[in-house]
């Protein structure tokens, strides 16, 4: 039963709302012993959202909004709960399924918080008119806090235009996102800068304009995410780890790598007839395109791959008597960790058009 303590007007029953923390969503109730934990539960007889603490007491929302002007606004309730009800403490918010929550006003969250749902297909978070061409959830003065999120869907379809971003953070300490879908926006699903601690994105979806933009200076792990061709823009990251992602468009600047499938364009530092070594812990796939410099030239691509700097051809591609100066031919081969590789210099009037190396994560 949902009830209210005397300090908020006496115990009372909310008609039509028969729920509790354990009934509203299946979570490990032991987690409620740490920090401040709340459940958001929509009233089935109205569009009001109730914020309930771990004792089942209403702390915001509904007819007694308690400092909230619109009890139907998920954005205002989220900001109020994180910044006022549980200010300066780690706040966990569990969303009751199945339901649609609407962010009507921007939420500026400046303390450590977590949002948990029962799965991205059971919780759908939409936006109102004030969020069109605007950011939905931001953090403008976070003082180094942690943001966690799991099992949610943020969907800009069917709303009044698109949000600009679902999330725009500056200065958060750590971002931990698992099983979260962010779609149908103008700029990015999530953008973050100056994030000092490791950041993990696991099994997330960035769809329909909802790319990922990070400029953090810290470790970033992107695992098993689906980008549907959206741009992943990464800058100034000390340790980048990426594996098993689906169809990303990478834009990477000034990053160092541990392991991952981000392709490295090394055309400017490669030449034919020179040996190179794969010094990383993973095999790499090497893709080379060559362009004929004049018509009638013979373009032959023969790479050597060996455990030492000695000949061992790994294939051959040949374009005999190229009819046009712009004709391009390519070859792909794999180099194991520690092995050496070279593109033979067999003469001819041609040049390297593109040389890309990509780690194969096993």
Image (tube, rainbow, N blue to C red):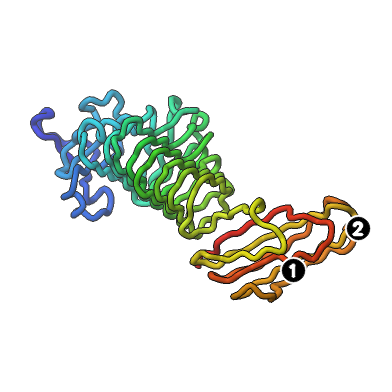
Q: Nearer the viewer, residue 210 or 119?
A: 210
First in residue order: circle 2 vs circle 1: 2
Q: Residue at x 61, y 64 (%)?
A: 276
Element carrying mark 2:
loop
User: Which residue carries the number 2 mark?
Assistant: 296
Check the picture and name the quadrant holding the N terminus: top left
Residue found at x 65% / y 72%: 305
Q: Is residue 321 left or right of residue 343?
A: right
Q: Nearer the viewer, residue 308 or 169?
A: 308
**Disc 2/disc 1 C-alpha distance (Å):** 19 Å
Image side of residue 99 versus residue 11, left or right = right
Work out whether residue 26 can be spotted: yes
Q: Count neighbours of disc 1 (C-alpha within 10 A) and say few if under 14, some if 14 to 19, many if 20 or more.
A: many
Residue 84: x, y in percent? 22, 30
Measuring from the top left, give residue 315's x and y in whole percent: 72, 72
At horizontal 37% and vertical 41% (from top left) the residue drawn is: 195
Q: Which residue is mark 1?
A: 302
- Residue 137: % across, % down: 38, 34
Q: Quadrant of residue 173?
A: top left
Q: Secondary structure at mark 1?
A: loop
Front-lying residue, 282 or 152: 282
Of residues 106 and 214, the one drawn nearer to the viewer in this rendering: 214
Q: Is residue 51 above or below residue 311?
A: above
**Is residue 78 visible from the viewing direction of this image?**
no
Numbered label tally: 2
Q: Position of residue 185 (x, y in %)?
A: 51, 36
Q: Residue at (21%, 52%) from the top-left corner?
A: 31
Asked if labels 1 and 2 touch by Cβ distance under 8 angstroms, the answer is no
Which label belongs to residue 187? Answer: none
């Amino acid at each position: 039963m949902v009830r209210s303590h005397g300090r908020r007007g006496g115990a009372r029953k909310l008609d039509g709302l028969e729920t509790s923390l354990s009934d509203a969503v299946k979570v490990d109730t032991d987690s409620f012993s740490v920090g401040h934990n709340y459940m958001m539960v929509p009233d089935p007889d109205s569009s009001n959202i109730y914020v309930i603490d771990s004792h089942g007491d209403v702390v915001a929302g509904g007819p007694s909004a308690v400092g909230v002007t619109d009890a139907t606004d998920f954005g205002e309730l989220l900001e109020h709960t994180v910044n006022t009800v549980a200010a300066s403490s780690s706040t966990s918010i569990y969303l009751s399924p199945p339901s649609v929550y609407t962010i009507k006003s921007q939420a500026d969250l400046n303390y450590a918080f977590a949002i948990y749902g029962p799965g991205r297909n059971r919780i759908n978070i939409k936006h109102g008119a004030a969020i069109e061409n605007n950011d939905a959830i931001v953090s403008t003065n976070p003082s180094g806090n942690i943001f966690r999120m799991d099992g949610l869907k943020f969907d800009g379809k069917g709303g009044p235009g698109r949000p600009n971003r679902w999330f725009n953070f500056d200065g958060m300490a750590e971002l931990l996102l698992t099983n979260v879908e962010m779609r149908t926006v103008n700029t990015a699903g999530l953008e973050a800068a100056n994030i000092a601690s490791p950041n993990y994105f696991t099994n997330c979806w960035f769809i329909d304009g909802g790319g990922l933009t990070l400029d953090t200076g810290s470790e970033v792990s992107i695992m098993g995410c689906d980008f549907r061709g959206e741009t992943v823009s990464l800058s100034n990251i000390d340790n980048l780890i990426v594996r098993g992602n689906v169809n990303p468009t990478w834009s990477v600047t000034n990053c160092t790598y541990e392991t991952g499938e981000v392709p490295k364009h090394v055309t400017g530092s490669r030449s034919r007839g020179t040996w190179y070594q794969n010094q990383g812990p993973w095999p790499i796939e090497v893709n080379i395109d060559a362009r004929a410099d004049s018509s009638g030239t013979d373009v032959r691509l023969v790479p050597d791959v060996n455990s030492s700097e000695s000949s061992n051809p790994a294939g051959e591609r040949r374009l005999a008597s190229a009819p046009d100066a712009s004709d391009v031919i390519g070859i792909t081969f794999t180099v194991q960790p520690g092995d050496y590789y070279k593109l033979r210099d067999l003469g001819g009037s041609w040049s390297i058009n593109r040389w890309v190396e990509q780690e194969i994560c096993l």
